[in-house]
Structure formats: C-alpha cells, structure tokens
Amino acid sequence: MATTRMKTTRMKLRARDTDRVEMCGLLDTAFAEGQLTEAEHATRTARAMKAATFEQLGKLVDDLQIPSRYDESAVVRPDRRPRERQPGGGRRWAVGAGIVAVAAVVGALAGSCSDGGGFSSSSAAVPMLTTGDGVRHFVDDYRAHFGDTVADEVLLFPEHASVDRQSDTDPTRYLDYTYDGEFDSFGSDSSRSRDTPTLDLGAVDLAAIAPLVSGAPETLRMPDGEVSQIRFEYDTNERVTEPVVSIYVTDAFENSTYMVAGFDGEVLEVNLPTD
C-alpha cells in the first residue's frame, strides 16, 4: 500500500514549464515517426502546454511507443521525481523552435497546429469550426452524439475539436474526445475533481456569438489574421462565476491575441496587440 500511495502522490506532482516543453518534444518525435496524425499532434500539444500535473502529461503518451532515449524522462516515468536541471545538463533531445514560440501564447499554438491535412475524410463535410456555422454544427453534432450539451471544456480549431467530458459512471474521472466530423475517445479516463464546474453548450447564444467570431480579426485590430481557436471554458485564472467563450486570432507571423465573451454574447475582455 505504501508503494501505491507513493506512486499516486508522484503522479499528482505538479509539472513545470520545462516538463511541458519536454513533453512537446516527445510528441514531435511521435508525429515525425507517424504514430500521431496532425490533428492528434495538435490536440495533444495543446493539452501538454496546459497540463498541471504529471498524471495529465502521462495520459498524452500512454498509447505511444516511446524511443529509448526517453526511458529515463520524468514525463514518461512519473514515478521518478524530477530533479532540477542544470544549465546545459545533458538533455538528449532538441525542442523545435516553433514549439518554444508556441508555449508562450495558446492562440499562436492553435494557429500553427491547425493548418494543412492529416484529418479524416469526414472533415470534408464539416464547416470550418472557427466560424459561426462551424460552432453551430459542432453543438448540433455534440448533442446528437452524447444526448446532452454538457462538458468540462471545449476547444475548437479550424478543422478539429477537443473536448473534456465527465465520465458517465464516475464524477471523479473525465474522458478526452477529439472531433473531426466524428467523436473519438482519446485514451483512457483521467482524474477529475468532483467539484469541477461543467458548462452547457446549449446555453450559448449562437446568434450572438457568430458575429463576434466573424468580426474578431477587426475587433482585435488584426484584420489580416484568422480565428485560430475558440474555447468554451471557465477561466480559472480569474474569479469568473460563469463560463466564457474565448476567441483567439492569429496572423501569418503567428502574432496572436484574443477576446472573451459570456455565453450571451456580452464582451467581457478585449486584448489588443501591442505596437
């Protein structure tokens, strides 16, 4: 029992930025080897950059073949408590420059990861999800698939989506789903706080949100940019008692900014690019 408790404690160990970036390097390798599609790589990279614990990081690779050079990595073996890395301390892999830039801004991450192919043929029948029509299509498909519109968090990229949803049998577990015209469960379930707030996509005023989405590049003074990500979430960094819609815009140079609105379409926050 002592061994089990120790392993559980270490799985809940908080991850650092260096651990998140290390996981991105591993995911890059898996993508280069053909283990992940472009959509899977984008989704898992997004999750890696916001992972809070080693348990959440571990879920991203539990179905992958791990190259031997990662065998001693703490993100692969959460039973190994990580030590502080010294400058130049023998890291045996290189992180792509794109991933390092992406780590700073989630919107830039969405823009860089969601271009191009690699999606199933079903995506051809799905409108771009980062449009008003795309959001409506996604909500309709979500309701048809699950029988309700409840989720913990939803991330919409242009050609695919990612969903965290409470387990139907255990409120202390959640499942990850990807969507590109069809919903697929991503790996096994993960631990979830029983008091995690859920949001209801059915409460979103789609008629009010659609013009915010289409006008976001102009609103955010990035007229040449495109909506790269739409997030339905509770903003855990602020004392927000209601779920919000965060709309990210990214330009060709991966400059990114965002705006936040309530589900009723009321604009709550606008972050303009700095000169």
Image (cartoon, rainbow, N blue to C red):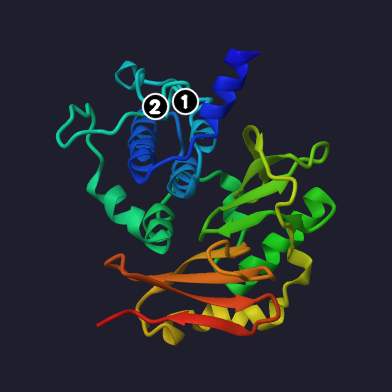
Amino acid type, label 2: Ala
Secondary structure at badge 2 equals loop
State which quarter of the image contains the N terminus.
top right
Instruction: Say which residue label 1 marks.
Output: 78
Instruction: Say which residue label 2 marks.
Output: 74
Secondary structure at badge 1 equals loop
Q: Is residue 173 left or right of residue 131?
A: right
Q: Image quadrant of residue 56?
A: top right
Q: Is residue 233 left or right of residue 110?
A: right
Residue 63 pos. (x, y %): 53, 25
Distance CA(mark 2)–CA(mark 1): 5 Å
Q: Is residue 225 left or right of residue 196?
A: left
Amino acid type, label 1: Pro
The residue sitting at 68% across, 40% down in the picture is 175
The residue sitting at 40% across, 30% down in the picture is 34
Q: Image quadrant of residue 115?
A: bottom left
Q: Are marks 2 and 1 in contact (CB under 8 Å)?
A: yes
Task: Classify 140 as above or below 3.
Answer: below
